């Protein structure tokens, strides 16, 4: 194992030893003096404390303030050199408000010194006049680098990459490389390696800084470089890039075009953002919310956004009620059915949600494909059948004793097995179909699954009751 790999694993272990909850608690403790200074109106202390924070922490502070006036006041106290990166860490709603209120000159100064990848993320939100001024004021080389990032979708490796790479050739000595670095006087943040390219700029491998410092300076780069780290194609989806970083414990990785030409690099800080955003997106989507929603947005704004989701759920609930209405005479004659109906639907919903979550996770990690989804379907159906048999017996015994009706016990037992099998099938099929048609499985999967398990559960239970009890 190389020294670089050991360092990566040690760093990763240290980071993972602190839970997300503990990290949030640490951040809250760090911001406590800022909150106190704000409450007491000590503007001088607030300015000093705010500008001692990292831009991400400034964004966290602003998003934690429920009062828009307080947010505006704090934003005006943020130093101009911190504003660009802070904007990138803010949610869409607050960022749009601040950009709308900032003068053109301030926006230009704010964005001018940002890294190319960060600026590429911010440019779509800036007014057209600001974008034009920025592009016109850039040197040709910097403008080309920015345009290179902008030419790729933000959800791809090309959209994530930074163009601040240091490239060297394989036919020079390590001593020459070290002289070159001393001449530059600065290397980009999170640099753990130098990119090796040929005369045409085609990527060939990397030279780790640890190897540069520990090997004989007379050796050539070609004899020390690592050719096993392949370049990531610029069109690769960001979730696949994140999975690659996780599997290989990478800090940085090269990005290349279809011809192997080195375009830039992706750094671990960008991947952390991807992983966080994906997790927030999946969690919030299950409730029909966006991870960019402002927790303290105005009541009317939040009401409008949530009304659509509530409307969709109302339609699905009406569909389930319609099925129940078809069997109203049966329910009136056998009142016990009304007591037991929610159990059938609930069991199917839970079983389906378990499968749905597993499938969405597999899709996000790239583990589920056309080659193995049938195996997963068979496995999930088998699991649901075994669980269905188990809980069908349990519920049948409880229902039989409760209502002294053996036929009713048989009905609910069969209905449970049917609904759990349907739930397993739907939990696999629904996200795959949604993904095929370009919809977000995390956002819409739960709604469709609940509808299916409710409708099938009620129909199976009440339908069997109509045949067997009347």
Image: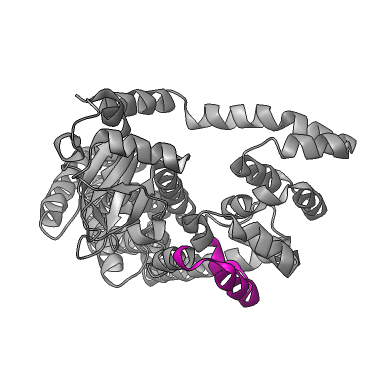
Q: Is residue 156 visible?
A: no
Q: Is residue 382 visible?
A: yes
Quadrant including the C terminus: bottom left
Residue 445 quadrant: bottom left
Residue 75 screen position, x and y as percent: 75, 51
Residue 20 higher or lower than 143, as above or below: above
Residue 319 screen position, x and y as percent: 41, 70
Residue extending furthest right?
Answer: 41
Quadrant including the N terminus: top left
| Residue sitting at x 56%, y 57% | 292
So how many labels did they put on this image?
Answer: 0
| Residue sitting at x 26%, y 34% | 174
Q: Is residue 438 left or right of residue 203?
A: right
Observer-nearest of 141 and 19: 141
The coloring applied to the image is one colour
What type of secondary structure mainly makes up the magenta span? helix
The residue segment tinted magenta is: 122-141
Residue 101 quadrant: bottom right
Q: Is residue 24 left or right of residue 241?
A: right
Residue 54 higher or lower than 381, as above or below: above
Residue 151 covered by magenta stretch: no
| Residue sitting at x 81%, y 32% | 36
Q: Is residue 142 left or right of residue 333?
A: right
| Residue sitting at x 16%, y 53% | 377
Observer-nearest of 307 and 96: 96
């Amino acid at each position: 194992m190389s020294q670089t790999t050991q360092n990566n694993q040690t760093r990763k272990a240290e980071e993972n030893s602190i839970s997300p909850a503990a990290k949030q608690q640490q951040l809250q403790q760090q911001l406590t003096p800022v909150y106190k200074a704000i409450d007491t109106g000590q503007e001088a202390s607030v300015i000093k404390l705010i500008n001692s924070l990292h831009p991400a922490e400034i964004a966290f502070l602003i998003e934690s303030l429920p009062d828009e006036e307080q947010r505006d006041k704090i934003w005006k106290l943020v130093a101009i050199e911190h504003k660009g990166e802070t904007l990138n860490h803010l949610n869409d709603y607050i960022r749009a408000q601040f950009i709308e209120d900032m003068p053109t000159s301030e926006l230009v100064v704010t964005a001018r010194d940002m890294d190319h990848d960060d600026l590429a993320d911010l440019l779509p939100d800036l007014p057209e006049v600001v974008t034009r001024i920025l592009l016109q004021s850039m040197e040709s080389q910097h403008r080309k680098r920015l345009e290179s990032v902008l030419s790729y979708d933000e959800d791809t490796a090309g959209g994530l990459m930074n163009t601040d790479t240091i490239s060297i050739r394989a036919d020079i000595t390590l001593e020459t490389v070290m002289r070159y670095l001393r001449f530059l006087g600065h290397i980009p943040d999170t640099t753990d390696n130098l990119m090796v390219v040929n005369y045409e700029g085609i990527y060939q491998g990397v030279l780790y800084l640890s190897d540069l410092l520990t090997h004989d300076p007379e050796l050539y780069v070609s004899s020390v470089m690592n050719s096993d780290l392949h370049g990531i194609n610029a069109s690769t989806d960001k979730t696949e890039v994140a999975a690659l970083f996780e599997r290989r414990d990478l800090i940085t990785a090269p990005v290349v075009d279809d011809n192997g030409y080195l375009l830039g690099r992706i750094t671990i800080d960008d991947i952390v953002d991807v992983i966080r955003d994906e997790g927030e997106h999946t969690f919030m989507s299950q409730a029909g919310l966006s991870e960019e929603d402002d927790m303290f947005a105005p009541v009317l704004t939040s009401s409008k956004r949530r009304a659509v989701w509530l409307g969709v759920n109302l339609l699905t609930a009406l569909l389930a009620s319609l099925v129940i209405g078809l069997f109203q005479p049966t329910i009136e004659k056998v009142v016990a059915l009304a007591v037991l109906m929610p159990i059938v639907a609930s069991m199917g919903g839970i079983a389906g949600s378990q499968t749905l979550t597993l499938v969405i996770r597999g899709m996000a990690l790239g583990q589920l494909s056309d080659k193995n989804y049938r195996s997963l379907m068979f496995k999930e159906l088998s699991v649901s059948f075994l669980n269905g048999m188990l809980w069908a017996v349990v519920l049948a015994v409880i229902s039989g004793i409760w209502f002294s009706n053996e036929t009713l016990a048989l009905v609910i037992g069969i209905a449970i097995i049917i609904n759990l099998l349907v739930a397993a099938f739907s939990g696999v099929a629904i996200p795959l179909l949604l993904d095929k048609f370009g919809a977000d499985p995390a956002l819409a999967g739960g709604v469709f699954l609940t509808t299916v398990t409710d409708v099938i559960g009620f129909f199976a239970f009440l339908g069997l009751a109509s045949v067997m009890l009347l």
